[in-house]
Image: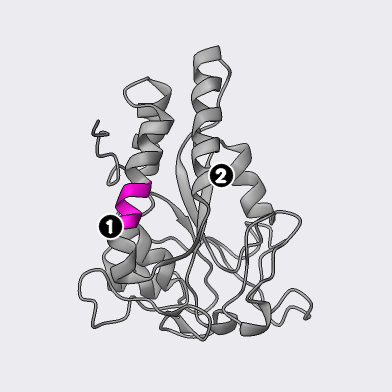
Amino acid sequence: MAHPDTTFLTAMQLAAAIRDGQVSAGEAMEAQLARIEMVNPLLNAIVTLDEEAARAGAKAADRAIARGDAVGPLHGVPVTLKDGHATAGMRTTVGLEAFADHVPTTDSTIAARLRKAGAIIIGKTNVPPRLRDLQTANPIFGRTCNPWDVTRTPGGSSGGAAAAVAAGLAPLEIGSDAGGSIRTPAHLTGIYGFKPTQASVPLTGSYADPPDMPRSFRLLFD
């Protein structure tokens, strides 16, 4: 049975459709995972994907709707995170070989707030090493391609994030930006990217450097 194609709805459109019963979280998740399976091999945008947890989260979201529970603004919405935001139980590498198997035990503030809002974190998107480049490639996962032309870069350092959103692999991504790392990829992939005022979003658990190094500069988030 075919699932409705919800993969190019905005995050808020999808959240509203799930809340209103127009589509189940499970159907939306299956559509998202099918899109990732089809397109991601061409782009290498999502580098860590937890399908089991994604489906479990969608089932839990549908049960909450069925019970009539109060739900958050992103209830049931699949999201990905740039591979510099710590996610409990999900690999977070910062694009460095030394941290290829690093699995945090606690969420970054950003991940925790997304979950509180009802979002389902399904995976992580590619970055350059230490998030310090205006392209996106690293020794662990290789190069991410621009979905409009795979011979070109989606920019960096949130290049995997931008490519994922532009290609319909995720309706929402959280990047980071100190010197154009959201703005450049958004421009190169034709999507909307926002860099908020410094310190308006807590940095706890979000890395520019490896987890055991002192932070060398402040980050700004989308």
Which quadrant holds the N terminus? top left
Name the residue type under label 2: Ala
Write the start and end of the magenta stretch as one range: 33-38
* Residue 150 percent location from the top left of the image: 24, 77
Name the residue type under label 1: Met
* Residue 73 percent location from the top left of the image: 50, 33
Q: Nearer the viewer, residue 77 or 220?
A: 77
Residue 53 numbered tag: 2
Q: Residues within 10 Å of mark 2 (few under 14, many from 20)?
A: some
- Residue 192 shows in this picture: no
Query: Residue at point 53% right, 81% down?
Result: 140
Query: In terms of secondary structure, where does tag 1 sit?
Result: helix
Is residue 218 shown in magenta? no
* Residue 123 percent location from the top left of the image: 51, 56
- Name the residue carrying label 1: 38
Query: Residue at point 66% right, 65% down?
Result: 206
Query: Residue at point 55% right, 37% down?
Result: 57
